[in-house]
Amino acid sequence: MTNEPITDLRLDQHLRHTLETVAETVTADVSAAPGGNTGKRPHRRYRRIGLVAGAVAVPLALAAAAFIQSGPEYVDQIPPESIIAKGNVGGSDYLLVENRRTECDRPAQGVELVEERENLFGSEWNTVGEQYGERVDDCGVDTKRYLANPALFNDGGVPVGDALVWLWAVHPDVTAVRITTSADVEDLPVYTVDGAGYALFEVPDDVEAFTAELLINGEVVPGSAEVHRLNAPARD
Amino acid sequence: MPTEKASAGFEETYREQRLPLLRFAYLLCGSRETSEDVVQSAFASAQSRWDQIQSPASYLRRSVLNLVKDGQRRRYRLATLVPVAQSEAVVLPPEVDETWTLIQHLPWPQRAVVVLHYYEDLPLVEIAQVLERSESTVRSDHRRALDKLRKALR
């Protein structure tokens, strides 16, 4: 806009104008009927975990006392043996647990991240999960192509306030996920669940970008590097 | 089973509210496809309990907000499992385009606060209720969002 600091009033007006202008680009040209079937997958209560930077996940033989309660729809109890790792960030405990959901009446593969304060007893589930392989339908994932190529993986991040936590589902041969930021290099441990590997990274608030690479016994898997730019608007 | 009167009210509300809800959803998620999906889902969910809904417009807005919020999380989760459809290209004035890009890159709570405050005209106190967050947290989200936008736009 200009090199001058933008005033509150001007920013207020600019935001209103921007949002109004963008909104007006949406027109009612969709043929959907009220209440009709969208044909989309039903929405699930399977949501997020809140993390802030600084925690370290630890192997979970130590976590028996940290389990929270779970159930099929509302938080009831999580069996301690299903907990893979735990940590604490910003005064909030979290768990990495085996996926306790079902898909088409079969136990779902993969993991869930569960933040305790977002999953208090009796509340609806509020977690996020990750699975290894390609989703073929609502009933599961196909791992054939992934297992043939260790460079293939799934990952995802969840914004929580100004923080993100990133979760990877990787080939079973992968032994670590290397994170490189402008300030640090860190090898994340990989936990084995359902024959695949899972790793998580709590993205520090001041990190604007990081590179993730998969390692097998200390060697980078060719083609596995991925650069993540966070909160950086795309510019040409 | 909805009564005939309720059914008429539902259809009228659909005609009146669908476009505003689509626009609201689009500002929250940045995807026309997702906007259509969540608005349709919100109406579908409301239809079965239409007789019990006191304030349909507020109910539908809350429903859209929650569906987008969940969708945001799920979209991140499935980012590499399912290809995310690209939004159709829309030509915007450069300053609007730049600011819209910045808004889209705000963390979800901050983006929601910005949209609810500057598009829906909700005071921060009401936004806290809608987002089920504390007032102090919402004020903090608002301040952080403005700080980022001001810094990027100067």
Image (cartoon, grey):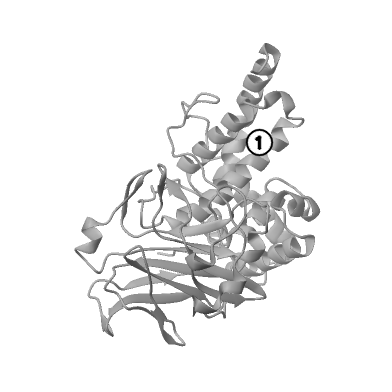
Q: Which amino acid does label 1 sit on?
A: Leu
Q: Mark 1 packing: few (<14 Cα in 10 Å), some, or many (20+)?
A: many
- Residue plotted at (72% across, 49% down): B130
Find residue B104 and report its image quarter.
bottom right
- Residue plotted at (45% across, 45% down): B90
Q: Nearer the viewer, residue B2 or B139?
A: B2
Q: Can residue B33 be seen in this view?
A: yes
Residue extending furthest top?
Answer: B4
Chain that bears disc 1: B
Q: In which quarter of the image is the C terminus of chain A?
A: bottom left
Q: In which quarter of the image is the N terminus of chain A?
A: bottom right
Q: In this view, does A154 lie above or below A4?
A: above
Q: Nearer the viewer, residue A14 or A191?
A: A191
Q: Can residue A232 be seen in this view?
A: no
Where does label 1 land, which residue?
A: B60
Q: Which of A220 and B98 is in front in this view?
A: A220
Q: Position of residue A45 (x, y in %)?
A: 55, 48
Find residue A204 and report its image quarter.
bottom right
Q: In this view, does B27 lie above or below B22?
A: below
- Residue plotted at (62% across, 45% down): B65
Q: Position of residue B70 (x, y in %)?
A: 55, 50
Q: Image check: A32 left or right of A142?
A: right
Please count the marks in the image: 1
Q: Image check: B59 left or right of A187?
A: right
Q: In this view, does A35 lie above or below A235?
A: above
- Helix, strand or loop under label 1: helix
Q: Nearer the viewer, residue A5 or A79?
A: A79
Q: Position of residue A144 (x, y in %)?
A: 22, 56
Q: In this view, does A48 lie above or below A92?
A: above
Q: Position of residue B38 (x, y in %)?
A: 54, 39
